[in-house]
Amino acid sequence: MTDLARFFDATGYTKLSERLPSHLVSRMRTVVDDHFARRVPPYRVNDAGQPCRLDDLLERDPVFLDALRHDVVVAGLRQILGPAVDVVHTRHNHATLNNSGDIPFRLHRDIQQWSQPLVAVFIYLEPATVANGCTTVVPASHRLPYAGPQSGGGGGNWADEHDQYRHLIGQELPVDMPAGGVLLLNCLCFHSVGRNTSASSRRSLVFACRSSDELSQADIPGVTRLFGERRFLANRVLHTSGSLRQGQS
C-alpha cells in the first residue's frame, strides 16, 4: 500500500499533490460557463432562480472524461481503487457554481454502506478557499456505522438527521484547493460545501468512481471505463446453464 493509499484509508480523503494542467482546466471552465450562461438543461437553480448546478457533465462534452483520464487523476485512483476503474454517471457527475448563499452548509455522506464503495473525484476550476466555501470534511468519519436511511429517499445520510452523527457538526475541517486541484473523497466520509462569505463564486466539478472487478456489472448503461481491463478473479465460474466449474483463485 502506498503512502497516499494509507492516508486515504485512515482519513477518508486525500489531496493529490499535482494539479491538472491549466489548458485542460480552461477548456472545462469554458464549457461550464457557456452552459450556465445558456441554461443548457439539465440544471438546478438557487433561491433567486439562477442556475447553480449543471447535471450530466459527462454527457455534455468529452473534455470531462479527458480530465478523469489525465495522468494526475489516474495515478491517484489507481493507488486507491486498483488497476481498473469506472466512472458512474448516475452519481455526482455535476458542476456547481457556489455563489454566496447558493448551497447551504449541511454535513452528509453520499452513500450509506461500505459494501458498495465509491470515491468522489472533486476537480476545482478556480481556487477554493475558506472565504468562498471550499469543501469541508470530517476526517475518519467514513468509519462510522450505518444509522438509517436518508429522508426523501436519498442514497446517503444527513448528519443532522441521526443522533449518532450530530456530534460531527462543528468538527469539519476546510480543505482549501488551487485551481486544477483534485480531491479524492471516500463517499462514506461526512463532508459539505463550505459557507461562501465572499463576493466571488467557486466553480467545481465532482464525479463518482469505483473499482471494476468480477463483482461489478459490466457493460451497463451509466458506467464508463476510465482505465484498465476488468479482470475475473473468482474461484468459481458460472456457466449460462447455471452449473459451476472450478476456476483459478
Image (spheres, grey):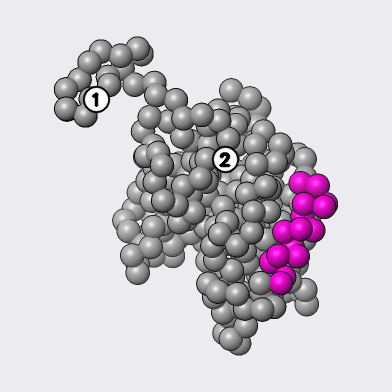
Residue 169: in sight, yes or no?
Answer: no
Placement of the N terminus among the 4 image quadrants: top right
Residue 41 lies in what quarter of the image?
A: bottom right
Q: Position of residue 116 (x, y in %)?
A: 39, 42
Residue 149 visible to an observer of this rendering: yes
Give the Cα distance between marks 2 and 1. 27 Å
Q: Position of residue 164 (x, y in %)?
A: 38, 54
Identify which residue is drawn at 25% across, 13% down: 246
Point 39% across, 21% down: residue = 233
What is the number of the mark on residue 238?
1
Q: Amino acid at mark 2?
A: Leu
Which label's residue is closer to the chain start, 2 or 1?
2
Location of residue 94 in the rendering, given as x and y in whole percent from the top left corner: 57, 62
- Mark 1 residue type: Leu
Indicate yes or no whether the magenta region holds residue 58.
no
Q: Where, quadrant-wise, is the C terminus in this rendering?
A: top left
In front: 242, or 249? 242
Q: Which residues are magenta?
A: 20-34
